[in-house]
Amino acid sequence: MPAEVDRLTPLTLALSRLRACGDDLRDMPSEHASGALKLLLAELDAEPLRGVLATLPEFDLARWWKQCAPAGGYNMGPVSLEFPLEIREGIACRLLICRDAAASPRGFQDFAYSFIGMRDDYDTRFRKFARLVVDPLIRDVEYLTTLRQAPPVLDQLVARVFPSTGDQDLDAMLEESRQKFQDPSAVIRKEALERLWDAWERLKTLLNPGNKEDSVRLLLDKAASTAAFRVVLEQEASTLTKLGNDFHIRHFEMNRNKLDASSEVDYLFHRMAALIWLILTQFAASQERG
């Protein structure tokens, strides 16, 4: 298999399909354009791009429309549209326009009537729509996938592979979590947090599979250099275990707390990853000392 195929990821494949949808919109006859637009929206609404777009702000399209539309609502020719400059707002605006256009012919006609003009034939108007709305939407979504607004310390942490535990299943869980956390999709990063907590529960049985409490005691004993720091680690381990149970990390009952903000996911991932990293590095050091 060619090396470049090996490097394909769900995200790169999704972006490739998104660009193909944009090409189809420009090239196919107008009677098929609505179907191509729906395919483009389906790609944006599916993972991994759905997770990338999960942080988009709410956008008041009606207000924007009113501000930008020419007086009287009818445009005699091309206008210079003022789309939002902030990238997420711009994506949200164009995405809503595309949804309106895909929902019914009236949605596209309303946009063309207000912003493109009705002198051209339908095919020309749709190509102009693609140039004004769809092409910049695809461009900005691609750029958004490159943005990862995590604290630098997190980037440094997940750039390194977790120390081996000697348990293949646990090592695989930790690596899956680490890889997923580097994904630009907020949904995939949430999955990374859940997987990290699963790994934590398995780690707690590493030294004594039949007695989790004793196993945790042994792990923390090896990780702490002083009695005072041993107390700190025990409190942190207890707190993180409770957080995993109280929030939508390990349990998803109605009485659990939701965890929606990406910054909160980053924060909890950092805390848990830092604790696991400390325990595993000190455990490996103790193994080397015999």
Image (cartoon, grey):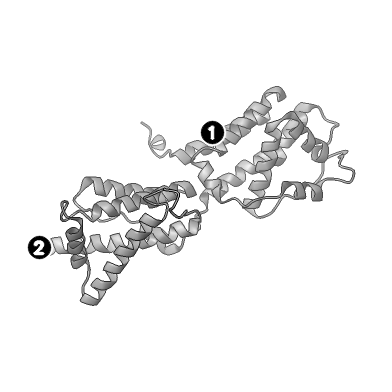
Residue placed most toward the observer, 230 or 95 = 230
Q: Is residue 90 visible?
A: yes
Choose top left, top right, bottom left or bottom right for residue 285: bottom left
Q: Residue at x 36, y 55 (%)?
A: 245
Assign the C terminus to one quadrant of the image: bottom left
For disc 1, the marked residue is: 17
Q: Nearer the viewer, mark 2 or mark 1?
A: 2
Q: Left or right: 219 with respect to 66?
A: left
Q: Is residue 156 visible?
A: no
Q: Residue at x 36, y 56 (%)?
A: 244
Q: Give the number of callouts.
A: 2
Q: Position of residue 152 (x, y in %)?
A: 44, 63
Query: 10 Å neighbourhood of mark 2: few (<14), some, or many (≥20)?
Result: few
Q: Secondary structure at mark 1?
A: helix
Q: Residue at x 75, y 27 (%)?
A: 123
Q: Left or right: 246 with respect to 57?
A: left
Residue placed most toward the observer, 10 or 63 = 63
Q: Position of residue 278 (x, y in %)?
A: 27, 64
Q: Position of residue 74 (x, y in %)?
A: 87, 39
Which residue type does callout 1 highlight? Arg
Which residue type does callout 2 highlight? Gly
Assign the N terminus to one quadrant of the image: top left
